[in-house]
Amino acid sequence: MFVRRSLAVALLVALVGGVPVAATAQTRRDVEKAEEQLERAQQQRKAKYREWIAAQNDLEVAVAHYEEIVQQLEELELRIHRVQDTIRRYETEAIDLRRRARELVYEAYTSSSPGLVSVAFEAGSIQDLLTSQVLIDEATNQDLAALDRLEAVKRDLDRLRADLEEDEAEMRRLEEDAERLVERMAELFEAAERAYAEASAAERRAIDKLAKERAEFAAAEARRKAEQALRARANASGAAAGLPPEATPGFVCPVDGRTSFINSWGFPRSGGRRHKGTDMFAKRGTPVQAVVDGVVRFRTVRLGGTVAYVYGDDGNKYYYAHLDGYVPGIVDGQRVSKGTDIGYVGNSGNARYTSPHLHFEIRVGGTRSVNPYPTVRYYCR
């Protein structure tokens, strides 16, 4: 008995002691990489924020320029209105002066002035006629003032029309400048907002990645500590001692119903084998459930009959044997959460002549069998 126990302890210590720690070390490096990525993302976000501030400053300059253009447009529009009013007033005055000039020509003509008749026939235009010396000689001082005013009004009209044309051209140019400036302001604002938003999103992704890496690192640390506890337990008592509760956090009872069992670890079996599980007796058809989160696999084997494996996220493999069948809707390779019913208690395989029961095993790291009795006793109370 002592030799058998010593061999079991030695074997378990050797197997557990061989658990690689590179996964934890790698996870720690992943955390460091995520921290570096977050730092770079934060620096990038700060740089984009500075660009955003610079764009805001450019935008302020553009807005000030735009306000100047708007002011110039308002002043120009006011000047154009004034010029247009002056032109209309001058045009009215010019009509009256031309009427007086025609009357003067008529009066001079009806006075039978020979010179005026000759000039009237030779004049190329009414303006030539109005400015002829003969007409001037015939006019009174009041009439001469009217003729001079007509000439002055004509010159002012020509000048005002030229000014109006220049002002309207300037207004069109300013309006085009204003439109281009508004488009540029919108581009500046949108580009700055987009760059800052992208940098902020990258920073948020880096924060999420760091949180994920830290959570995975914490889980890896928890597994490492559990394995350390397992090694310590194995050093003290061997595989028969099973796992301490802290090594199986969140574990649930594999039988989803009333069950009875004893510590049958190491009991002799046919062919010189030793029992490496716990037989949990229950009524046929009682559901059995995933004890942890993981992936379920279904198989049919000679000894175990209809069996299931749960490859746990905790790194362990859990074996369910002698099942009566599988839960409809649960398929091989499916991911399941702890507490999910996966099969039913039965007596398939080499247990066909026994009472229905679940043969349950815990294989640490997927290969190292340990006594499940302490675990199921703790969680199935």
Image (cartoon, rainbow, N blue to C red):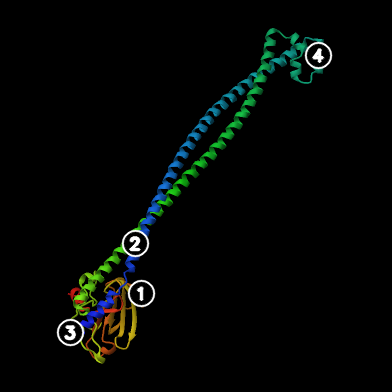
First along the sequence among labels 1 and 4: 4
Q: Cα distance, mark 4 to mark 2?
A: 112 Å
> Which residue sits at x=57%, y=37%?
176
Discs 3/4, front:
3
CB contact under 8 Å: marks 3 and 4: no
Residue at image mark 4: 117
**Could you say which quadrant of the image residue 173 lies in?**
top right
Instruction: Give the class, few, some or many, for how many residues have Cα within 10 Å of label 3's Cα (few <14, many ≥20).
Output: few
Q: Is residue 69 left or right of residue 363?
A: right
Q: Relative to the observer, which residue lies in front, 282 or 56? A: 56
In three-dimensional space, the C-alpha distance between marks 1 and 4, rounded to whole angstroms, equals: 120 Å
Image quadrant in which you'd find residue 104: top right
In front: label 2 or label 3: 3
Circle 1 sits on which residue? 334
Q: Which mark is residue 2?
A: 3
Q: Earlier in the sequence, mark 2 or mark 1?
A: 2
Q: Is residue 367 above or below residue 269?
A: above
Mark 2 lies on residue: 213
Q: Nearer the viewer, mark 3 or mark 1?
A: 3
Q: Amino acid at mark 4?
A: Val
Residue 122 shows in this picture: yes
Circle 1 sits in a helix, a strand or a loop, which is it? loop
Query: Within 10 Å of the Cα at label 1, are there few (<14), some (14-19), or many (20+) other Cα atoms?
Result: few
The reply to whether discs 1 and 4 touch (Cβ–Cβ < 8 Å) is no
- Give how far across and how far down residue 329 sits, in percent: 34, 76
Residue 263 vertical position relative to residue 203 in the rendered view, above or below: below
